[in-house]
Each structure stands twice: as C-alpha cells, then as structure tokens.
Amino acid sequence: MTKEVFVQGNEACALGAIAAGCRFFAGYPITPSTEIAEIMSKKLPTVGGRFVQMEDEIAAVGAIIGASWGGQKVVTATSGPGFSLMQENIGYAAITETPIVIINMQRGSPSTGQPTRSAQADMMQTRWGSHGDYETISLAPSSVQECFDYTVEAFNLAEKYRCPVFVMADEIVGHMREKITIPDKIDITPRQMPEKCENYLPYDAPENSTTPMPSFASGFNIHVTGLTHDERGYPSTDDPDVHSKLVTRLCNKILKNRSDIAQIDTKYIDDAEIIVLGYGIPSRSALTAVKKARDSGLKVGYIKLGVVWPFAEELLLEYTKNAKRIIVPELNLGQVYLEVDRVLGKNAKVELVSKIGGALITPDEILDKIMEE
Amino acid sequence: MIENEHPHKFIKYLRTERLPHLFCPGCGNGIIFNTLFNAIEMSDVDFENISMVSGIGCSSRIPGYVKCDSLHTTHGRAIAFATGLKMANSKQDVIVVTGDGDATSIGGNHLIHAARRNIDLTVICVNNDIYGMTGGQISPTSPKGSYATTAPYGSTDKPFNIAEVAKAAGASYVAKYTVAQPIQVSNAIKEGLANKGFSLIEVIAQCPTYYGRKNKLKTPKAMIDWFKENTISLKQAEDMTDEELEGKIITGVYINKPRAEFIESLDAISAQNSDITPEDNINKAYMGD
C-alpha cells in the first residue's frame, strides 16, 4: 500500500536509500546533511544494515567502496567541505567501476562558506572534482518527493552503469518539509553476479558498457586496483592502448548512454520562444514564473533537468529547437549555464539568472528576465 | 611465468601469471609473503575466505600477487576501505597490508580510529623506514639522523614506534618483529588472525635499494645484520633510558588483550531492534526485492 509521510528532504533521501536496498552507510557529520547520517544510524540496525561514523569524509568514501565490493548497496551524505575531501576516492570508484551513491546537500561556498545556507555551487565539482578524465551521473532534486525518488534512481543508475552517482540537492530541499508518497512497489535494479568460468576476466567489458560485478568472498579471487588495469584487472600502467581503451570506455559508458540516463520534465515547450531551463530548487520558482508569463500571453516554456550530468545534449537540442532565448536560473555564478550555452547557444541566446548568498531565486526575478526583451 | 621442477610450497597461493614481481632484489617483502603464507597454514583461517586490502607503496603491492580477492586502494586509505569491506560481510577474514608511510603518515588517522573501534582486521604493517616506491624519501618511522632524498642532511624528527601508536589507540593485539625473526612474525600473524578484533603486526623490513644505499647499509645482509644488532625485547627495554633506547628496535607482543569487537557490538544492538540479521543481508545488492 502506498504511504504518505510528511518529512524533510534529508529524511526522504534516507528513506529512499533504504527502499532502494541500501544496507550500509559510512559518513561524517556536516551541516546541512547531518540528518541523513542520524536517520541512517537509527534505521539501518532495524533492517539488518550497518552504520559507521568514520573519522573523516575520505574514510567515508573508502568505506562505502569497500562495502560495495563486499556486496552491499552503499551511500554516504555530505556537503561542500566534505565533498572536497571525498574527491580522491570518487576517482577510485570511477576507475574501478564501483557503484556508490553520494548525497551532497549543497551549501554556500567556497571553503567553509555558509553552512546553513543553500547553493548549487558544486555542480562543476561533481562532474570532475577528482583528477583525470572520467564521467559520472548527477541528479538534482527540486522537492522532497524527488529527494526520495531520485535517491532510489541514483542507486539504480549506480548499479546499471557501475559508477559513482551523486544526488546534488541543496540546503533548502534538504531542510524543507513536504508531504511525499512512498509507493508500495519500488523498481530496484539488483546487481548481477557474473558467471564463474575458466579464465574469468572481471574487466572484459563491451565498448561503451560495463560488466557484471562480483562480490568479494564469492570465489572469484579478483584483483581491484586504482591503477590502469587490463581485462584481468591487473595493473598495466605503461601500455598506452590499455589506458586509452579503459578511460575511453569509462567515459563512453556514460556519455554514449546520456539520452537513456536523462530525466527531463517539460511544460509548454511546443510553441515556446523562450524556455526557462533549470535544475534543482530554482526550478520551483521557474515553473511559477513560466505560468505567470503564459497567463500574460507570452510563449514561454519550462524544462527541468532531473539528471544534470551527463548533459542530455541531443534531447535538449530537440526540445529547444524553436526557442530564441533560454534562461538558466541557478544558485551559483553560472556553472551549468556554461554547458547550456555550449550545447544550445548556437541556436538560441542563453541567459543566466544567478543568485548566491543563500536565498532562493524568486519567480519574479525569473519573470523580470523573461520580460527583458 | 617461471617454470620450476621443484615449485615452492607456497606457489599455490600466488597469481603465478603475474610473476616475476616488481620488488627489487634483496627486498624484505619476500619474507613477508613467506611468513604470511606460513601463518595462514598454521592458523584455522581458510585461505578461500581471505580478502586482502592494501594502500599505496611497495608492500601494498603484495596482495596483488596473492590468489584471493584483493583491493589495491588509494594512498593511506586501505584500513578505511577494509572497514567497509568487513562490515559488508563480516564472515570474511580481512587482511590489510600497508607500509610505514601508508599507515602512519597519510593514513595515520584511519589507523588510530580502526584500532579504537577494535574492528576485526589483521593489519600487517611492513616498516622499511623509507618511501621506496617514490625513490627514497623520509618516512615517519625513519630513525633520527638517517638520510633520505628529502632528508639530505639527516632526519631531525623523532620517529613513530608504530606498535606503540596502535596499542595506545586501542588495538587488542599488537606485535612487532623484524624480518630476521620470521618464526616470530608468522606466529604473530597467526595470533592476529585468531584475535577477534583489531590486530597489528609491525614487521621491520629492509630496503637495501633506498634506505640501505642512503645509509651505508647497501646489501640486504648489511641491513639484516643492522636489525639484529639493534633488536631488543620489550623486557630488555623496560630497564633502559630514553638515550639507550634511541635507534633500538623493540620487539615482542605489545598487547594481547581481547575486548568487545566493533561489528559484534553493532550486531548486538541490531538484535535488540530487529529480527533481520546482517547475515541475512550478505550480498544484499544482488537481491531483487
């Protein structure tokens, strides 16, 4: 039976993780995400899961990667300063193709910044915060319901693509309380155990794809390393072809599947000359602004990216093909705006509505931008 | 792969397709392999049930040659990864192989907190007093006055006694020996595997290539002789002054005092709150419901 609960975004993330089958959490307290750790510490022992508060965020990601190879679905939660510490092992998860989910309740930054204020300023860091070429998946919830839904989806995507997946929420969504519906049946993607065979090759993946992931202590006797590795999983650090093949595949298994990974909500775009294209919490203001503009007879449309990275280039080109202007509201000085401009800027004028400091962009601020021309 | 009419009795534990290994001639890691396999054979642990975890450095390459599941992680983080791996499926025997720089410099925080929790890991810390993989830089255990590429005038710092650090942080089994005491090392690893809690076995090992070359101990024999000359027991150390102890390798069992293990303590709480045990959830990621 579906259940309705009145919860904050942080709690919805925790509920979503457990609903998705997560039974391990390792984390470190940080505002404004701490409630997720608190709730997981209370709930996991009631479902046969295990919780550990680690000594820092570096250790938290190390522990969830270890637990993922131990056969668990795993999550940690943090905010900017902790996210910076996590980058080292995020790169390790990317190259070893370890499914992990990281929830980032973004706050004002850089550095310690504004612990209790909202921001979307880690959107570029989530993409390439660790060193090297790699691709991951980032979702951006704009409501408490989406905190639940997108966390479940993050686990499913992590399993399907064997990569780190980020739920890039923010302080407002994390601490906001809304009524949400928890369905009785939730689609979850189980991990696939490979078949045992002679000369099993754990990293022998098809182009643009990945392979089933064995768990440790299941008799596969595999080697997992952050060094460039061949199909056997063994280090091969001097052969340019091995490195090129591996890193290209790691990127392409995400990039070439971006239209499948995409999650895009649209409204009023068929005849739209102006489109407000947002993600996360400013999309709530954007929808109000678009409706007001429509009421006054303007042909304005709305696009919300549920998945921000990988950037759904082909779908967005299609959805915006008639637009003359595209307005991007975000709580930073222009990050995703740069990618929108790169991909859609040839056909339309891409404009930024930026706000930092902690307050949300209001519908009127977006409406003012719509009315500028 | 090297064919041999009379294969070594421990060759069955190795990924022979990866041989020859990358260790320098005269490296102490050979004795670590030997003492580890000997300990496993002496213990009740099933080799098939072992998972190994390591960080970055020469000794952290050891698990990559062992025919069990092995996780070669980031610099200093092996114990953090091992914590998660063990918590995901506590039926595994998890062995961490780490070095002095890995465990006590970049990874010092993870070492002390895992010891504090008394999580059931067996950590073999191969201490060669130098950064070998990067070519001979000073380490937190390098003796005062020793030379390294980043201590061209000699080290000014007081070195860590890793065994003391682990004991002070709460490890329930800690022992320290040199590679010149292989029987004691094997026994200590065996004890560590048997201990339900955090066990650390520090093994002083020679690096003739970098430590030896920089410190007038160019051959493996010179280094091992140097270990022997400077090795004293914990008992002998009791009556010695700080001045007398400088440069000495104090060997023996630092602590063997079992106490409540971390995961068992967590599971006792789970048992009070649910009928679902963590064992029911082993490999939960593979379950569809």
Image (cartoon, rainbow, N blue to C red):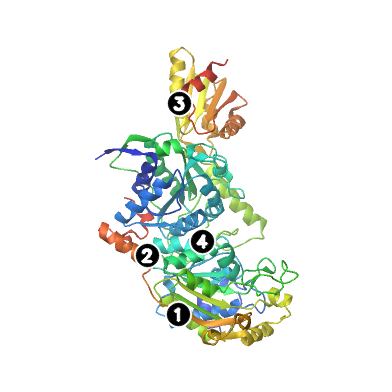
The residue indicated by pointer 4 is: A201
> As displayed, is residue B36 above or below residue A249?
below
SS under mark 2:
helix
Q: CA distance from mark 1 to mark 3?
A: 64 Å
Amino acid carrying label 1: it is Lys
Q: Is residue A19 left or right of residue B224?
A: left
Residue A349 visible to an observer of this rendering: yes
Q: Residue at x 63, y 72 (%)?
A: B158
Q: CA distance from mark 3 to mark 2?
A: 46 Å
Q: CA distance from mark 4 to mark 2?
A: 33 Å
Mark 1 packing: few (<14 Cα in 10 Å), some, or many (20+)? many
The residue indicated by pointer 3 is: A285
Q: Is residue B238 left or right of residue B226?
A: left
| Mark linked to residue B287 | none
Of badges 4 and 2, the one in the foreground is 2
Q: Between residue A97 and residue A24, name the one nearer to us.
A: A24
Q: Are marks 4 and 2 in contact (CB under 8 Å)?
A: no
Q: Tell me where residue A349 appears, x and y as whole percent.
A: 60, 23
Q: CA distance from mark 1 to mark 4?
A: 32 Å
Mark 2 packing: few (<14 Cα in 10 Å), some, or many (20+)? many
Q: Are marks 2 and 1 in contact (CB under 8 Å)?
A: no
> As displayed, is residue B263 above or below residue A210?
below
SS under mark 3:
helix
Amino acid carrying label 2: it is Ile
The residue indicated by pointer 2 is: B263
SS under mark 1:
helix
